């Protein structure tokens, strides 16, 4: 409101009609020869034409309102620029190489938690658990901890904002692949998690911009997670539309990880990135979608993106859709005596808020401590390992 008042004050001379305009209005309303409007006499002498003054004032006011709306509406309706999120790992993903590296790290984080069984069975197992454990609030909370734990390795990596990748010519025993990439992320305790990928590149296109050449390519290869090997492939599509005063770029890239024994079970990661520039203003939207397929059928869809609060604090939004249930959670990293995550949102259709503490037992192993009010639930944490030199 203060901005509108300030704008009105600054633009008053341009909005309100000047003396010449008012004189033209008088001539239009009362041409020569027309009967004069009734007059009112002042006590000190003199008269005034009340009907004429009223009509002039009303007409001038209406004209001022029209002019005001003509100026202010475009200002009010114009889309404000939305800058990139300040911070967050996504800002480090700028080309095909960094995208495939992030795909290996993020899907690897999900798989590392599910090494004990086929990763494709985990969503079904979680869904069965949620459908049977609904007798009490405590049972529901216990089921929720199981459901959320599957993604905490990914959440930690995204909130730690530490992401490194190194691509080299392959000199290992896997002679069928030309390239090797080691991807490293850090968890909230500062420990390193590393994944190795071997692959071949398939050229797609070449772009030259500002004297720099960028090659877009697909990949085919394998990803090593723990003691298991997963087939992977990545594809990228870049599209740019340029019109007068408007430039729109859309990037749709995919990274797929297949079960080594049944390729109809797989995880598909997609980057949804849209950059639109219009009249000098830029809006950027970026999120990543992980879809799990079993026997070629979609069983779960998870979306992650960053959000920034007014105070600048960074949050990670996690949306999980499965079995006609949509869960939405916001994670925020809190550092104090213990490393913890503050979580709020909706689970199983109900509002929820809790904290997740990363604790260590007497043997030095770390675990998650979920705290709902005064109720605690402990859950195994993924194994961490120091980065290989």
Image: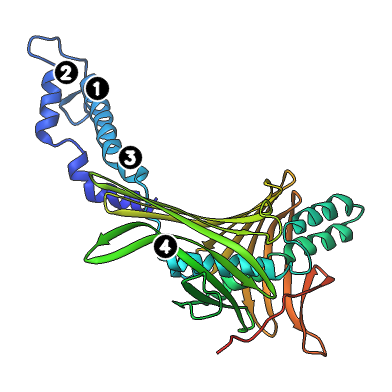
Q: How crowded is mark 4: few (under 14 residues within 10 Å), some or many (20 or more)?
A: some
Foreground: disc 4 or disc 3: 4
Describe the element under mark 1 as helix, strand or loop: helix
Asked whether the beta carbons under mark 1 and mark 4 sit within 8 Å of each other, the answer is no
- The mark found on residue 318 in the picture is none
The answer to whether the residue labelled 2 contacts the one labelled 4, judged by CB atoms less than 8 Å apart, is: no
**Which residue corresponds to the image point at 56% horizontal and 68% vertical from the top-left?**
104
Q: Nearer the viewer, residue 186 or 14?
A: 186
Q: Quadrant for residue 368, please give it.
A: bottom right
Q: Name the residue under label 4.
A: 84
Per the model, the C-alpha gap separating discs 3 and 2 is 29 Å
Q: Is mark 2 on a helix, strand or loop?
A: helix
**Residue 46 seen by the camera:** yes
Which label's residue is closer to the chain start, 1 or 3?
1
Residue marked by disc 3: 73
Disc number for residue 55: 1
Residue at the location (49% across, 81% down)?
A: 171
Q: How far apart are marks 1 and 3 (CA)?
A: 27 Å
**Residue for badge 2:** 29
| 77 w.r.t. 112: above or below | above
- Tell me: 224 left or right of 68: right
The reply to whether discs 3 and 2 touch (Cβ–Cβ < 8 Å) is: no
User: Nearer the observer, disc 1 or disc 3?
Assistant: 3
Label 3 residue SS: helix
Q: Is residue 97 left or right of residue 121?
A: left
Structural crowding at the residue carrying mark 1, measured as other residues with C-alpha within 10 Å and reported as few (<14), some (14–19) or many (≥20): some
């Amino acid at each position: 409101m203060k901005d509108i008042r300030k704008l009105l004050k600054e633009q008053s001379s341009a909005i309100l009609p000047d003396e010449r305009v008012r004189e033209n209005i008088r001539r239009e309303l009362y041409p020569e020869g027309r009967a004069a409007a009734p007059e009112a006499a002042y006590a000190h002498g003199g008269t005034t034409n009340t009907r004429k003054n009223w009509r002039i004032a009303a007409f001038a006011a209406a004209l001022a309102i029209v002019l005001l709306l003509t100026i202010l509406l475009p200002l009010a309706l114009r889309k404000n620029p939305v800058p990139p999120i300040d911070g967050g790992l996504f800002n480090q993903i700028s080309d095909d190489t960094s995208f495939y590296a992030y795909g290996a790290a993020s899907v690897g984080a999900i798989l590392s938690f599910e090494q004990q069984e086929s990763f494709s069975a985990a969503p079904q197992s979680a869904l069965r658990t949620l459908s049977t454990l609904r007798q009490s609030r405590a049972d529901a909370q216990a089921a929720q901890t199981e459901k959320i734990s599957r993604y905490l390795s990914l959440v930690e990596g995204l909130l730690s904002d530490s992401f490194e990748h190194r691509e080299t010519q392959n000199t290992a025993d896997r002679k069928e692949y030309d390239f090797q990439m080691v991807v490293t992320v850090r968890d909230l305790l500062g420990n390193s998690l590393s994944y190795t990928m071997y692959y071949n590149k398939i050229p797609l296109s070449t772009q030259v911009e500002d004297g720099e050449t960028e090659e877009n390519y697909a990949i085919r290869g394998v990803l090593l997670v723990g003691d298991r090997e997963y087939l992977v492939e990545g594809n990228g599509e870049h599209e740019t539309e340029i019109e007068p005063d408007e430039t729109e770029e859309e990037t749709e890239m995919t990274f797929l990880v297949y079960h080594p024994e049944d390729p109809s079970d797989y995880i598909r990661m997609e980057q949804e990135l849209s950059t639109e520039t219009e009249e000098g203003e830029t809006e950027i939207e970026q999120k990543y979608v992980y879809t799990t397929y079993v026997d070629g059928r979609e069983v779960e869809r998870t979306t992650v993106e960053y959000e920034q609060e007014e105070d600048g604090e960074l949050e990670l939004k996690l949306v999980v859709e499965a079995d006609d249930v949509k869960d939405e959670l916001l994670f925020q990293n809190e550092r104090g005596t213990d490393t913890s995550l503050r979580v709020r949102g909706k689970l199983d259709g109900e509002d929820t808020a809790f904290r997740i503490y990363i604790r260590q037992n007497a043997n030095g192993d770390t675990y998650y401590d979920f705290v709902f009010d005064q109720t605690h639930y402990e859950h195994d944490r993924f194994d961490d390992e120091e980065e290989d030199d």
